[in-house]
Image (tube, grey):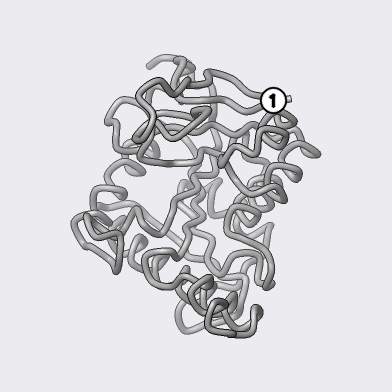
Amino acid sequence: MAELKYKRILLKLSGESLGGKSGFGIDVDEAESVASRIKEVREMGVDVAVVIGAGNLWRGKQGLERGMDRSTADYMGMLATVMNATALMDALERQGVYTRVMSAIEMRAIAEPYIRRRAVRHLEKGRVVIFGAGTGNPFFSTDTAAALRATEIDAQVVIKATKVDGVYDSDPKKNPNAKKFDTLSYIEVLNRRLEVMDSTAITLCMENNMPILVLNLWDSKALLGALRGEAVGTLVTA
């Protein structure tokens, strides 16, 4: 087997990755497809942690437009991430992958409370760890949760899974001449306002020298190629 470039990763998934063609709700087939990708990585001997969003179940922006309290909207989003995490856990375990869901908000009947040392121990034992409920605090996105958890567990990279093969200077679906970046610095991402992750997450990665790799999870060769050190997607570093 080829030498691996990364041996511990934090995979950031959008909630829409479980939503099927509509992007809404939880599609069992999509959950199984994502689980199979993660299983392939785990079978390479890579430690895998996951943070998943909630956009397929709840969009706080819609509540805010109706006057909802921001904290309430954010807590609802955190609960939705635990639903997604549980669905992904089920899909993984049906494929024979030992998995643990850890929640930043205590709900012991459903998930383990997040404890950093316990999370690291699960990874060392070969389990996939899915972090739910974001950071446990309103006003912080799941992008920020991904950056935070990656730093805490000593991951070597945050892999932002999208349905596009990297970061472009404009929307490639609307602009056929859009330019794809192979590499970017954190400062370039912030200055250009590129939608890689939100600015808080980018800054946290920059301060802790945590690389971010943006790739197309639905390209069957992209993730495995990236782990082997192939030039895939867009790499954001110092």
**Would residue 95 be found to the left or right of residue 118 on screen?**
left
The total number of labels drawn is 1
Q: Is residue 160 above or below residue 55?
A: above
Residue with the most extreme right position: 207
**Would residue 237 be found to the left or right of residue 6 on screen?**
right
**Would residue 96 be found to the left or right of residue 233 on screen?**
left
Q: Which residue is mark 1?
A: 185
Which residue occupies 37% across, 65% down? 56
Q: Position of residue 176 (x, y in %)?
A: 35, 24
Placement of the C terminus among the 4 image quadrants? top right
**In the foreground, 181 or 233:** 181
Q: Is residue 64 above or below residue 205?
A: below
Which residue occupies 75% across, 36% down? 206
Q: Position of residue 39 (x, y in %)?
A: 32, 43
Q: Hey, which quadrant is residue 107 in on the image?
A: bottom right
**In the foreground, 224 or 195:** 195
**In the foreground, 8 or 28:** 28
Q: Position of residue 183 (x, y in %)?
A: 59, 20
Which residue occupies 69% across, 25% down? 185
Placement of the N terminus among the 4 image quadrants? top left
Q: Position of residue 172 (x, y in %)?
A: 39, 30
Numbered disc 1: secondary structure: strand
Q: Residues within 10 Å of mark 1 (few under 14, many from 20)?
A: some
Q: Is residue 189 above or below residue 34?
A: above
**Would residue 41 be found to the left or right of residue 218 on screen?**
right
- Report the amino acid beneath label 1: Ser
Which residue occupies 36% across, 57% down? 16
